[in-house]
Amino acid sequence: MFDKQTTILPDRITIHSHFKELPGNPSPSHSFFLQKEYLEAVEEADIPGVEYRYIPYLKQGRVEGLYYFQIINLSAQELGQIVHFEPYNKLLSGLSMLLQNLLFGVKKDKPHYLIISGSMCLSGDYGIGRLTSDDKSIYSNFPHALSQLRHELERNGKVVAEIIKDFPVDSDPLHTILKPAYYHHLAMDPIMKMAIRPAWGSISDYVDALSSKYRQRFNQAKKKLGHCEVRSLDTPFIIENRERINELYTAVQEKSPVRIIKPDVNYIISLSKHLGEKVDIKGLFYNNELIAFLIGIQDEDHFEAHHIGIDYHHNKEFSLYLNILYLYIEMAIDVKARVVSFGRTALQMKTTVGAVSYPYNAYIKLNNRLLNGVLKETTT
């Protein structure tokens, strides 16, 4: 497995396995998701096959930023299969293991690592954090930090690939830096976001702003949900009902054809325990049975529509997914957020509630030169 000790490398770079080891407790200014509360909550969740690396960015002896990496041990048995085409058809299902072996060539005799710059739990730029918004030198120094991390991991294993995510297309600070180093664009869906108007004081104001077509759609969905009860879920409830929550959580995750990490109910418990008022977890109940849940996290004036769980046997009957989107909008209005981020899935459905797509750049480099060359041909 991983060396859990702090590794000191040349050029004043230090690589840490835990946030608490970092000097100066760096808290990047632009996001809650790169601060102590969230990062330590993710660590405690103990997501299968995943560990973490933190590299403080030093400038004139002071910590001025943070590089955050998730390290996926592709050899870990608990990680399981990454490429899943089962939800689609039998032919693709048969190809899924072949594709996984081709891309990652994993042998179980030693660790094979996938380096993620950023977070696979979130959509957005959460791999590089600046303590001051006007300091851009952290980006030009990023390749050096990544190179040092690669060398550390290759002491006892093999780095198979590196993924760097996510940067807005219109303000991508890494595009010119990574291209000469043979990183290629990684095709990803846009991130869906919706602006919350300052005049909206409640969900009723949002509904009033809709066209008659979409107002009718909202009313129909809410009428279906009228048979259900929406409740806030606290940590004791989540722990007591962990099996049911994990069942609902897994049902949603299994609909994704690529699942690089597989957080379970422990992730939800950890968020509930550590994030305080920043996190809001709600459950939808029918006849006192939990049939869905949703997690929202406040990030300054942004609201993250985080992970959900659904019993798909009830999805159509109660319009669960659509009602979850409306609940997220209501939660964002209640905390006076400026924007709600819906992530990358179900793009068309999110468009119908008012979300707009924002393209983001992500990059990949396979450390097999032949495969990386083939990848270049398919991404240019």
Image (cartoon, helix red, strand yellow):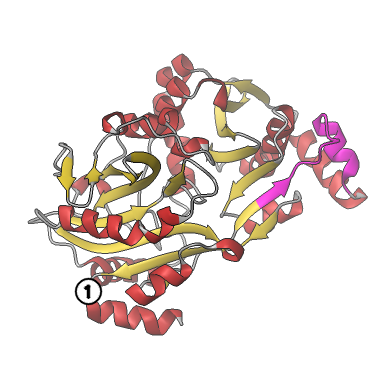
Disc 1 crowd rating (10 Å Cα; few below 14, some 14-19, many 20+) is: some
Mark 1 lies on a secondary structure that is loop
Q: Is residue 83 visible?
A: no
Measuring 59% from the left and 20% from the top, which residue is drawn there? 288
Residue bearing mark 1: 368
In the image, residue 27 lies at what x, y percent?
44, 34
Tell which residue pokes out farthest to the front in this image: 60
Tell me if 266 is positioned left or right of 167 in this view: left
Q: Is residue 167 above or below residue 127?
A: below
Tell me if 98 is positioned left or right of 172 in this view: left
Rendering quarter of residue 46: top left
Q: Nearer the viewer, residue 371 or 198?
A: 198
Identity of the amino acid at label 1?
A: Asn
In the image, residue 131 lies at what x, y percent?
47, 40
Q: Is residue 354 above or below residue 47?
A: below
Measuring 22% from the left and 56% from the top, which residue is drawn there? 148
Q: Is residue 240 above or below residue 105?
A: above
Tell which residue pokes out farthest to the top in this image: 236
In the image, residue 328 lies at what x, y percent?
67, 37
Magenta residues span: 193-210
In the image, residue 76 lies at what x, y percent?
19, 49
Measuring 59% from the left and 26% from the top, which residue is drawn there? 282
Q: Is residue 358 magenta?
A: no
Q: Is residue 205 magenta?
A: yes
Rendering quarter of residue 310: top right
